[in-house]
Amino acid sequence: AAKDAAPAANETAPASPGDRAKSEAEKILGTGWWGTGNYFSITKIVLFIIVFWLWVYTADWMNDDMEHRKVESREMRNLQFFLIYLIGSAIAFYIPTFWAAFPITVLVWIVPAVVYVKLRNKGLPEPEKVWTRDHIVYVYAVLLSKIGVKVKMKKRMSYETGVPVELAPTEKGAAPQVLQGRLILARNAPGYNDFRAYLYDGLLRGADAIMFDYTPQKTVVRHQIDGVWIEIIEVPRVVEKGKEKDKLELALEAGKLLLGANPADRRSKQGGPFVATLNKTKYDCEFVSQGTRGGEAMMIQFVRQKVAFNTLDELGLFPQVQERLRTFLNAPKGFFVISAPPANGLRSSADVFIRNCDRFTRDVAAVEDVMHPDRQIENIILNRYDSSKGESPMTVLPDIFFKEPQAVVVREMVNVDSLTLCCEEVVNNRLIISTIKAKDAVEAMFRFLAMKVDPQLFASALAGVVCQRLVRKLCPECKEGFQPPPQLLQSLGFAPGTVKELFRVRSPLPPELEQKRKPCSTCNDIGYKGRTAIFELIELNDELRSLLVTQPNPAAIRQAVVKQRQPGFLQYGAELVRQGITSVDELSRVLKM
Ligand SMILES: [Zn+2]
């Protein structure tokens, strides 16, 4: 319609001065998107293109901003922003009057952008907000300074700018004035903002710890994510002229000042606790520095809220294994052991297992050290001893057994007396559940034997041992399918041709494409996100019991377990690989533990 209307208007003869003026104006501006004659007006097209470029710039900034802030609905928001503009512009093209159509293209750019900024500024700390008075002044000041104009700005305190992480030392027993003094000292240190920036990065990536490995040539920064140290960046040591220290050294000095440590001392072990606050969430942190052979190592650990599992399903335990496990936990008698290597979730898994022990129709008692309290479990009678007073489970066990409970949970045996008494009680129709740190089920047995318990007594009481290890899960966003070669399937115990596709960490693209690629926002290009467990459950039988007494060496027991076809970590892990939950590489890393 616009196409026909515009030229027609120019052909009509002007009748009055008013009409003539209107016609003159139309000659210049045209009526629709078309100029005089049958072509687009250059002015209008230029105006449109300017708005279009502004829109592209805004869309790009929004996308980067959302990525930076880890907004989960980023792609949805991008699509919305795009569709609003597309539909708005399409409508504008069908409006015959240009000066009615053009504002629409401006509005469909500006209104969604304003709404976005309003929503994003909500809940963000001041330095992160955009379009505030301070921010606009700042942007203009930067632009004007490029052409030599200096604008006076309200000077921000150094700690008010930069990343939105606030720090506070929290040493127990230290006077508040002392802690406040340390904070002021750290805030005035030149590296304070960089120190916060390193913390911020670690928190955003979901690290459990940050390690700085300092040498006179370079510093390697690593994050511990899902139990694995990942190199994040290698910072070469660059010292500016006239200065003695590089930026990273200054950052770590600020960290030491915060904890009241001596920055000049780079040999002895120093450190302490502090709290980092990010978006109103508080993180308990621990900072340790110590000299190494080549320089100095510093570590910041975050005490994150551990995910608490409640059911065997949540633990990811396969139904068949759940059933076998329940048989042990609800057996009338026997000594049952729950084990895991250090830092492999023994405590939280033991909680779940114990919850699955029938504690509603049976009397279940538990022994706990006052110094290491566990998560409360309903319907279990708790009996406490105090290890700081030299007490052990033996302090309370005789009284407990006197009351004849059907099951007793003793997480830490502590000494041979407790262990012996528990094994003896199994004969009196009692179930004993205990935990121990060990890399596999066989090692768990030998850790108990190493306490010098009578092997005959222990072997006859022992009913079963479960062991768990944690494996990282492949990132669901960027994992890559591949056709497994027959040898690989065979090594996992699958018959050839039974598995069509397995998954692995994404392979890198050719260098020039790899550089342009945006990193995976789910896993930060690590390829893994979160962890799950693999299990090994050994059921004691006559052959294993007699081996424990006559041939007490781990290799012999392991061999017998394999011969009896009791499924181990490999079988369990292979199933996770088959389901695409983890990779062959990750499984072999964990199996080599
Ligand atoms: Zn990913």
Image (spheres, rainbow, N blue to C red):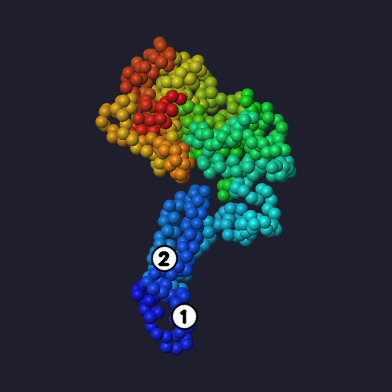
Which residue appears at 63% of the width and 34% of the height?
237
Which residue appears at 41% of the width and 69% of the height?
40
Q: Quadrant of the N terminus?
A: bottom left
List x then y, in percent, for residue 482: 33, 35
List x then y, in percent, for residue 413: 51, 24
Label 1 sits on residue? 24
Label 2 sits on residue? 89
Which residue appears at 36% of the width and 19% of the height?
561
**Amino acid type at mark 2:** Ser
Which residue appears at 44% of the width and 44% of the height?
517
Q: Specify few, some or many for label 2: CA neighbours under 10 Å numbering under 14, 14-19, or 20 or more.
A: many
Secondary element under disc 2, as helix, strand or loop, is helix
Residue most toward the left? 497
**Amino acid type at mark 1:** Glu
Whether residue 249 appears in this view of the structure is yes
Precedes in sequence: disc 1 or disc 2: 1
